Image: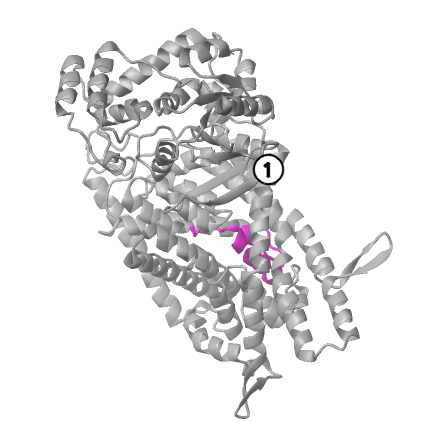
C-alpha cells in the first residue's frame, strides 16, 4: 500500500537537507495546484511505495502567508499518512509552537529533533523519551547535516504509517479553555471529521478569516468567545496563544536541561558582533561580494572559462604532449569529409556551435559563482545579509524581507520573483517584484564576463561593480517609487530568525550548485539553441537584387534591417550599432542570448574570454564607456520572457505587469544614458547638448529625492520604522 509522508517544520530547521538525504535523486519539482509555490516531492530511498512531500517551511498554521495557506490546506484536505515534524533542537521552544498545531490535525506525528550534535556541544540535554511521553508521539534524534539518525527516522515513520493502532497525539490547555473548546466542537457539523474537530474549534476561537474556504457551514460561536474572554480577561486569539506557550513551557521544564553558563554568548553571537555591526556590516558584505565576483569572473573563473573557450569550444588544447582538437575543429573536419553543404556547415558551425558554444563557455564561471553563493547561504551568512540590508532598505522605503527574493534571484530571477509572495504588504510585494531582477542572476553572468574580458581587458572592477549597480538600482527605486501614490505607505515590519552558523557539507553545496548550473545548461540546449538558429537565419538571409536569398554581406541581412530600425533608439546610450541593438533585443528571450548573438555575429572564436580577437572588431563600434552602458542596460532592463511570465503571474494584473516592465526598461535606459554621457565627458572632455540635458535631469531627480526625504523628517515621520510618532525620533524598530 502506498504511503504518503509530509515533512513539516520551521524555516531553517534542516527540513530541505533531511528531504534531500531521504530521497536522494528520486525528487520531482513542480508547483502546487493553482499557486506558484514550489512543490517538492520524492520517493523514500529503498521504498518504492513511500512518497515524501516537502511542505513549505512555516512558523505556524495561521494563514498569513501563501506558504502557510498551502501547507495547512494540504494537511487538512490531503491528510497524509504521517507528518514528520522536523524540529531544531537548539531552538526547541519556538519550534514546538508549530508542533502543537500539527498535533491538533488528527494525523499521526513523528518528531525528528535535528541538530542534536549542537545541543550536546553546547552542554545541554534533551530527554527524548520524556519528550515523547509528554507529546504522545514518537521522537527520534537526527543530525541532517551529518547524516546521523536519518535511517532511524525513516524506519520509524514507515512503521508508524503501517501501524494498525495509530497513536494520535493530543495536548490539553487549561480547564477554562478546554471547556469552551468542547462547546465549540459540539457546534461543528458532520462535514468535519471527529479527529479534526479540535483543530477547527481552535481556529474558530482565533477568528480565522480563511475558515469559510474550508467549511461550508461556519457556526456562530460569539457567545463562547465572549465567555472565555470574560473569564480570562483577554481576547480569544491571545488566550489560545498564551495557553499554547504555557503548555510548551511545561514540556521544556521537564524535558530540557540547559547548562548554566557564565557567558551565554555562542560562537554565532560572537561572529554576529562583527558581521552585523552597524559600522562594519556593510563594508564586510561589500568585501565578501567583491571577493566572490573577483574569484568567479576575474581570476579562477577566467582560467576555467579560457580553457573551455579556447580548448573545448576553440582550437583545442594539449594534454600530456597530445594535441586534442576542440569541438568546432572536430565538427568542421567531419562535415568537410562527408561533403556537407556550405549553408548547413555554416548553420552548424556559426549558428549552433558558435551561438550555444559561446554561452556554454561561461558555465565554469557560473559554477564557481554558484558554489560561493551556495556556501554563503548554507553557512547562515546570507540570512544576516537580509538583516543588514534591512537597516539600509528601511531608510528608502523597503524592508530586509524584500532582500530575500533578491538573494534567491541571484541564481535565477524566476524563483526570486516568486519568493516575493512571503511579503504581507501588497505595496511592498509589488515593489519587490519590480526590483528583484536588478540583482544579476546567473544568466547575466556571461554578459558581465564578456564585457569584462573582451572590452575591458579583464579589469578587476567590472564584475563586482555589476552587483553593486543592481543594489544601487534597488535603493534608488525604493526612494523613487515610495514617493508615488501607488507605493506610498509604511514599511512592512521585518522579523527573521538568524540560524546558527555552521559549516555546510560538500554534498549540499555541490547539489545546490548543480541544480542551478544544470538548469542553465538545459536552457542552452533548448531556448538558446532555437534562438541562435533563428539569429543565424536572420543574419545570413535577406533581400538582394529583388529576391530573397542567402547574403554574402551580413549588413544586407534581415537581422541588419531589423537591428537598423531599433539601433537609433540606443544611439544616445553610445551603442547605436545594429549588432549591439539586436543582441540587446534577443536578450529579452533569454539573457544568455546576448552572448549567443555575438557568438553568431562575430564567430565563436571572436568572443573568446580574453577578448583578443573580438577587441579589434568591436573597438571601432563602441567605446569602453558605451560598452559599460550596454552592460548596465542589459542588467537593469526588462528580464527574460520566463521572468516576465513570473512577474505577470505574481502581479495577477496586466496593468501592474506593464508598469513593472515599463519601469525596469525606463530606469535601465536612463541609467545607461547617464553613464555614457557623463563617462564621455571624463573620457573626451567634450560637453554636448545630450550631456547638459542628462546633467539637468540627474540634478532635478537628486534634488527631488533629497527634498522629499527632508519633508518627511520635518513632518516627524520616522523613516526608519515608518511610523508617524514624533517621540521616537526614528529610533523604534
Q: Position of residue 162 (x, y in %)?
A: 50, 24
In depth, the one of 26 and 533 nearer the eye is: 26
- Compared to residue 290, the image places residue 630 above or below, namely below
Which quadrant would the C terminus be assigned to in this image? Answer: top left
Decide if residue 577 is on the left or right side of residue 248: right
User: Which residue is depicted at the point 63% across and 67% down?
Assistant: 352
Magenta run includes residue 443: yes
In depth, the one of 194 and 309 nearer the eye is: 194
In depth, the one of 160 and 487 nearer the eye is: 160
Residue 611 placement: quadrant: bottom right
Q: Residues within 10 Å of mark 1 (few under 14, many from 20)?
A: many
State the count of labels.
1
Decide if residue 94 is on the left or right side of residue 266: left
Q: As drawn, which residue projects farthest toward the bottom? A: 545
Q: Position of residue 153 (x, y in %)?
A: 54, 23
Magenta run includes residue 194: no
- Compared to residue 599, the image places residue 288 above or below, namely above
User: Which residue is depicted at the point 44% across and 78% down?
Assistant: 565
Q: How is the image coloured?
A: one colour
In depth, the one of 664 and 124 nearer the eye is: 124
Residue annotated with mark 1: 509
- The residue range painted magenta reads 437-463
- Compared to residue 178, the image places residue 433 above or below, namely below
Of helix, strand and loop, which one carries label 1?
helix
Residue 554 placement: quadrant: bottom right
Decide if residue 168 is on the left or right side of residue 536: left
Residue 673 visible, this orientation: yes
Residue 262 visible, this orientation: no
Q: Position of residue 140 (x, y in %)?
A: 52, 18
- Compared to residue 209, the image places residue 642 above or below, namely below
Q: Position of residue 534 (x, y in %)?
A: 55, 71
User: Which residue is depicted at the point 43% across and 52% down?
Assistant: 438
Amino acid at each position: 500500500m502506498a504511503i504518503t509522508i509530509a515533512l513539516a517544520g520551521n524555516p531553517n530547521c534542516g527540513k530541505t537537507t533531511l528531504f534531500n538525504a531521504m530521497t536522494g535523486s528520486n525528487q520531482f519539482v513542480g508547483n502546487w495546484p493553482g499557486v506558484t509555490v514550489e512543490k517538492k516531492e520524492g520517493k523514500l530511498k529503498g521504498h518504492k511505495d513511500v512518497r515524501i512531500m516537502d511542505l513549505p517551511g512555516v512558523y505556524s498554521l495561521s494563514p498569513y502567508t501563501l506558504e502557510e495557506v498551502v501547507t495547512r490546506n494540504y494537511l487538512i484536505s490531503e491528510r497524509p499518512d504521517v507528518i514528520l515534524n522536523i524540529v531544531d533542537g537548539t531552538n526547541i521552544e519556538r519550534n514546538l509552537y508549530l508542533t502543537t498545531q500539527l498535533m491538533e490535525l488528527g494525523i499521526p506525528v513523528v518528531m525528528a529533533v535535528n541538530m542534536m550534535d549542537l545541543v550536546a556541544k553546547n552542554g545541554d540535554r534533551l530527554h527524548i523519551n520524556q519528550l515523547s511521553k509528554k507529546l504522545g508521539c514518537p521522537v527520534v534524534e537526527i543530525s541532517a547535516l551529518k547524516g546521523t539518525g536519518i535511517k532511524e527516522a525513516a524506519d520509524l515513520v514507515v512503521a508508524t504509517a503501517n501501524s494498525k493502532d495509530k497513536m494520535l497525539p493530543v495536548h490539553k490547555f487549561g480547564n477554562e479553555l478546554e471547556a469552551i473548546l468542547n462547546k465549540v466542537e459540539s457546534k461543528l457539523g458532520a462535514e468535519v471529521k471527529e479527529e479534526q474537530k479540535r483543530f477547527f474549534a481552535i481556529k474558530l476561537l482565533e477568528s480565522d478569516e480563511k475558515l469559510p474556504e474550508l467549511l461550508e457551514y461556519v457556526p456562530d460561536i460569539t457567545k463562547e468567545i465572549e465567555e472565555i474572554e470574560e473569564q480570562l480577561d483577554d481576547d480569544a486569539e491571545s488566550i489560545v496563544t498564551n495557553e499554547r506557550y504555557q503548555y510548551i513551557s511545561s514540556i521544556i521544564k521537564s524535558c530540557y536541561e540547559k547548562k548554566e553558563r557564565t557567558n551565554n554568548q555562542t560562537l554565532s553571537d560572537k561572529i554576529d558582533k562583527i558581521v552585523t555591526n552597524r559600522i562594519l556590516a556593510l563594508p564586510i558584505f561589500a568585501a565578501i561580494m567583491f571577493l566572490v565576483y573577483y574569484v568567479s569572473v576575474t581570476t579562477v573563473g577566467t582560467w576555467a572559462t579560457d580553457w573551455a573557450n579556447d580548448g573545448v569550444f576553440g582550437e583545442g588544447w594539449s594534454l600530456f604532449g597530445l594535441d586534442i582538437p576542440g569541438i568546432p575543429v572536430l565538427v568542421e573536419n567531419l562535415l568537410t569529409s562527408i561533403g556537407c553543404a556550405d549553408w548547413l556547415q555554416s548553420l552548424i558551425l556559426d549558428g549552433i556551435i558558435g551561438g550555444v558554444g559561446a554561452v556554454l563557455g561561461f558555465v565554469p564561471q557560473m559554477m564557481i559563482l554558484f558554489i560561493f553563493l551556495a556556501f554563503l547561504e548554507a553557512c547562515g551568512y546570507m540570512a544576516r545579509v537580509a538583516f543588514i540590508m534591512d537597516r539600509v532598505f528601511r531608510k528608502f522605503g523597503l524592508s530586509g524581507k524584500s532582500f530575500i527574493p533578491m538573494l534567491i534571484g541571484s541564481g535565477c530571477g524566476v524563483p526570486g520573483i516568486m519568493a516575493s509572495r512571503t511579503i504581507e504588504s501588497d505595496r511592498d510585494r509589488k515593489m519587490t517584484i519590480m526590483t528583484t531582477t536588478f540583482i544579476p542572476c546567473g544568466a547575466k553572468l556571461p554578459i558581465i564576463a564578456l564585457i569584462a574580458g573582451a572590452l575591458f581587458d579583464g579589469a578587476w572592477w567590472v564584475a563586482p561593480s555589476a552587483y553593486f549597480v543592481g543594489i544601487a538600482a534597488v535603493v534608488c527605486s525604493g526612494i523613487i517609487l515610495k514617493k508615488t501614490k501607488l507605493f506610498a505607505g509604511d514599511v512592512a515590519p521585518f522579523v527573521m530568525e538568524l540560524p546558527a552558523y555552521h559549516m555546510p557539507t560538500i554534498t549540499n553545496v555541490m547539489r545546490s550548485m548543480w541544480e542551478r548550473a544544470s538548469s542553465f545548461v538545459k536552457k542552452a540546449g533548448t531556448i538558446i539553441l532555437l534562438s541562435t538558429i533563428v539569429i543565424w537565419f536572420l543574419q545570413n538571409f535577406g533581400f538582394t537584387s529583388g529576391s530573397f536569398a542567402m547574403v554574402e554581406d551580413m549588413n544586407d541581412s534581415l537581422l541588419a534591417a531589423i537591428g537598423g530600425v531599433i539601433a537609433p533608439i540606443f544611439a544616445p546610450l553610445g551603442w547605436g550599432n545594429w549588432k549591439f541593438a539586436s543582441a540587446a533585443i534577443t536578450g529579452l528571450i533569454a539573457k544568455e542570448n546576448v552572448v549567443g548573438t555575438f557568438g553568431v555575429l562575430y564567430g565563436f572564436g571572436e568572443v573568446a574570454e580574453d577578448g583578443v580577437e573580438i577587441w579589434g572588431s568591436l573597438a571601432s563600434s563602441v567605446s569602453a564607456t558605451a560598452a559599460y552602458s550596454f552592460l548596465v542596460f542589459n542588467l537593469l532592463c526588462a528580464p527574460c520572457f520566463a521572468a516576465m511570465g513570473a512577474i505577470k503571474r505574481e502581479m495577477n494584473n496586466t496593468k501592474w505587469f506593464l508598469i513593472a516592465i515599463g519601469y525596469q526598461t525606463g530606469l535601465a535606459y536612463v541609467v545607461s544614458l547617464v553613464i555614457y554621457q557623463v563617462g564621455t565627458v571624463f573620457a573626451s572632455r567634450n560637453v554636448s547638448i545630450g550631456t547638459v540635458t542628462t546633467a539637468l535631469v540627474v540634478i532635478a531627480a537628486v534634488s527631488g529625492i533629497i527634498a522629499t526625504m527632508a519633508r518627511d523628517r520635518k513632518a516627524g515621520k520616522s523613516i526608519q520604522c515608518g511610523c508617524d510618532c514624533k517621540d521616537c525620533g526614528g529610533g523604534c524598530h
